[in-house]
Amino acid sequence: MAEIKIEKKKPIWPWIVAVLLISALVYYVFLRDDQVQNENRMEIENNSSVDSTANY
Amino acid sequence: MENKDRNLYRLDELSDYKVASNYSDVRGWKIVDADNRTIGKIDNLWVNKDMQRVVYLDVNLDKGLIEDHRNEVHDAIANENGQEFIYKDGDSHIIIPIGSVSINKDTKIVMANNIGYDTFRKTSRYNWQHNFDREYERRVLNSYYPTEESRLASESNDDTFYKRREFDNY
């Protein structure tokens, strides 16, 4: 004879929060690091161009 | 209203519930009697929230079966000049206790083992747009299990009403 049980659906919002947190972490670790490096590189380039004119 | 008191709901109504894993969601499956005659299609599942399980299959009866019943009633009226038994449009659903059927997962067919086509044909129907009350449940169970009639009459609360073999495992 048959039996069918039911159960509560697992809520989806913890997954959404987890995805958002991971996305934020990825952004912070990789993209933000790239941005800082680019800014540093630009600063170095600017400084080196000033130095080269100073020799003349 | 009374259904809410009895904690009986259509599974579709409970958006935060689903059929538990390892159990078949038989909605949309065909239901046949023990002789493989088509009774209808399972339209919904009536669940008891306290018990966390299905107690009735909500079956949309096959048109052929309804037509057979209509012809039989018309014959009876013609022969005996009796009172006509009229169903309104939409009175095409019946409930079947879950413990009265077996489920074939491979063929996706549900079989009512001990209830025959003729019994289903004569069983009182209800309109799927409305709920049913405990009295309707008793009437249906009396139709399926006439020998249990006296026992059914005395039990009114969910705890005792659904704890019997027709609802499985009791």
Image: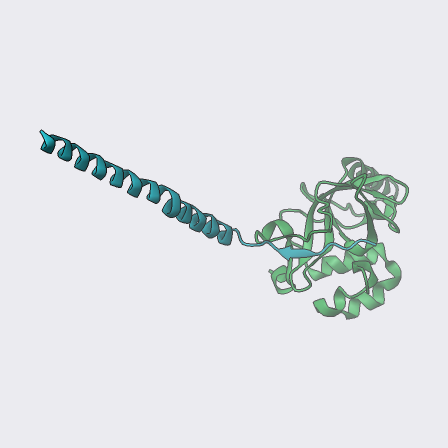
Chain B colour in the picture: green
Which corner quadrant of the image does residue B138 belong to?
bottom right
Question: What chain is colored cyan?
Answer: A
Where does the image place residue B164, in percent across and percent down from the top left? 81, 64
**Which of these two is toward me, B77 or B42?**
B42
Q: Is residue A17 left or right of residue B145?
A: left
Which corner quadrant of the image does residue B3 belong to?
bottom right
In the image, what residue occupies the spot 57% across and 51% down? B15
Quarter containing the N terminus of chain B: bottom right
Query: Farthest residue toward the front?
Result: A55
In the image, what residue occupies the spot 29% across and 43% down? A36
**Which of these two is toward me, B155 or B80?**
B155
Query: Farthest residue toward the top?
Result: A56
In the image, what residue occupies the spot 84% across and 67% down? B150
Quarter containing the C terminus of chain B: bottom right
Where does the image place residue B27, in percent across and percent down from the top left? 70, 44
Q: Is residue A9 left or right of residue B43?
A: left
In the image, what residue occupies the spot 78% across and 57% down? B139
**Which of these two is toward me, A12 or B32?**
A12
Where does the image place residue A22, in percent across and percent down from the top left? 45, 49
Where does the image place residue B54, in percent across and percent down from the top left? 71, 55
Q: Is residue A2 left or right of residue A25?
A: right
Which corner quadrant of the image does residue B40 belong to?
top right
Considering only vertical position in the picture, is B75 above or below B52?
Answer: above
Considering only vertical position in the picture, is A39 above or below B135?
Answer: above
